[in-house]
Image (cartoon, rainbow, N blue to C red):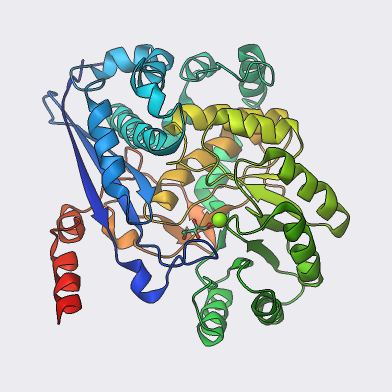
Amino acid sequence: MQENKIIKLTVRDVRFPTSLEQHGSDAMHTDPDYSVAYVVLETDSDAALKGYGLTFTVGRGTEIVVCAVKALSTLVVGKTLKEIVSDFRGFYRLLSSDGQMRWVGPEKGVIQLATAAILNAVWDLWARVEGKPLWKLLVDMDPAKLISCIDFRYITDALTEQEALDILVKAKKGQKSREEQMLKEGYPAYTTSCAWLGYTDQQLTQLCSEALAQGWTKFKVKVGADLQDDIRRCSLIRKLIGPNNTLMIDANQRWDVNEAITWVTKLAEFHPLWIEEPTCPDDVLGHASISKALAPLGIGVATGEQCHNRVMFKQFLQAAALQFVQIDSCRVGSVNENLAIILMAAKFNVPVCPHAGGVGLCELVQHLILFDYISVSASLNNRMCEYVDHLHEHFESPTIIRNAHYIPPKDPGYSCEMLEESVQKHQYPDGEVWRAIEQQGKQ
Ligand SMILES: C[C@H](O)[C@@H](O)[C@@H](O)[C@H](O)C(=O)O
Ligand SMILES: [Mg+2]
């Protein structure tokens, strides 16, 4: 491998005014403007190779993530890709455990989002150098090498390196045929695009009917602000999709623990498969109580989009506090930490159903769930990946959905390179889209 020295890191604040039409709205995030801190790593390679990475935010505050990326950039610029990937665990630690910067974390909040953006760009660069889409780089990688990318600190009481290795080695059986199956059929997806909280019943009906016609069979509805509204909306969507299609509900952390149990019990007649983020994302024992109370109703608990590191996931799994693990490609420490979470989920036999949507999350996480199926879980039982139909047109290699399945990406990299024109137009606050919005506000 060429050395590929990283000689420059740039990071930009890119925002899309999705709140104008209530796309992405939920019981806690009523006006999200889907945004990213967008990182580009430049190298000294002959081919002028670059690595692209991002982390997702919902508008205000993205400038803080940009600042954190700049603070971490000193740890990356000057390193070669070769030295990073020859000791990826060490590099992960360098970033996540810097003796001074860890004080503003550790491994949580803004600094963790910034870590994700940078490491996503490093993984993108690595996959490009190897000429493979990221999922294929992972699937083809020797299990021992994969394990060497993971920081096992704080999780060995739940999963040892040896156990992780055993899981990967065992799943080698049948890998080839699962890869072929994915290339042919794709990975099953569900849609959240029909029922954002701010959408009217009329919009919900129209979007849901269109989705059914396109072959979607699994639907997620936002709940949690008003019980009567939730009953009306869930009843409407259940009627539209019929008894055999799958319904999930998502409260985005709106309730206290007992309130969650009472509220969801009142929605049980609509047979949701799961309630997502019923309460505070840090409340492991609260989620365990909710899981226990709802189990007799056949409703599981799903969480993860704001679960900030592997240690949180470890506790959720140990406490049987979740029945669906929602990994997120931009919340935790990139592929390195998601590998740890995927392997812990396999050990505890809990299905991984990734969180996606936003801007870029579908593009990224599809790689991880393909790896999970082909190289770890070997199962599609109770598993599906979220899909949201917004903003894909801003990417060089947008997701491909066929018959409600993610079709494996073929382009080398991690699919997060954005169109330069889109980045420039949406850069905050100076891009033309934001200047026009500011002008309208002044009129
Ligand atoms: C603010 C965002 O759109 C969230 O509502 C979204 O990530 C959501 O929780 C989801 O599960 O897709
Ligand atoms: Mg959610």
Relative to 58, residue 165 above or below: above
* Furthest residue in direction right, as rendered: 296
Left or right position of 184 against 167: left
Return the x and y of residue 348 as percentages of the image width and height.
73, 31
* Furthest residue in direction bottom, as rendered: 202
Asked which quadrant contains residue 297, the reply is bottom right
Q: Residue at x 61, y 17 (%)?
A: 165
Residue 174 seen from this side: no
Quadrant including the C terminus: bottom left
Residue 372 seen from this side: yes
The count of marks equals 0
Return the x and y of residue 403 as percentages of the image width and height.
54, 64
Q: Residue at x 81, y 65 (%)?
A: 265
Relative to 380, residue 402 above or below: below
Quadrant including the N terminus: top left
Left or right position of 373 against 57: right
Instruction: Identify which residue, 402 or 31, lies in the foreground.
Output: 31
Q: Residue at x 38, y 75 (%)?
A: 21
Return the x and y of residue 305 as percentages of the image width and height.
53, 47
Q: Residue at x 20, y 60 (%)?
A: 426
Left or right position of 69 against 220: left
Asked which quadrant contains residue 424, the reply is bottom left
Relative to 165, residue 415 above or below: below
Return the x and y of residue 425 as percentages of the image width and height.
16, 61
Instruction: Identify which residue, 161 or 184, lies in the foreground.
Output: 161
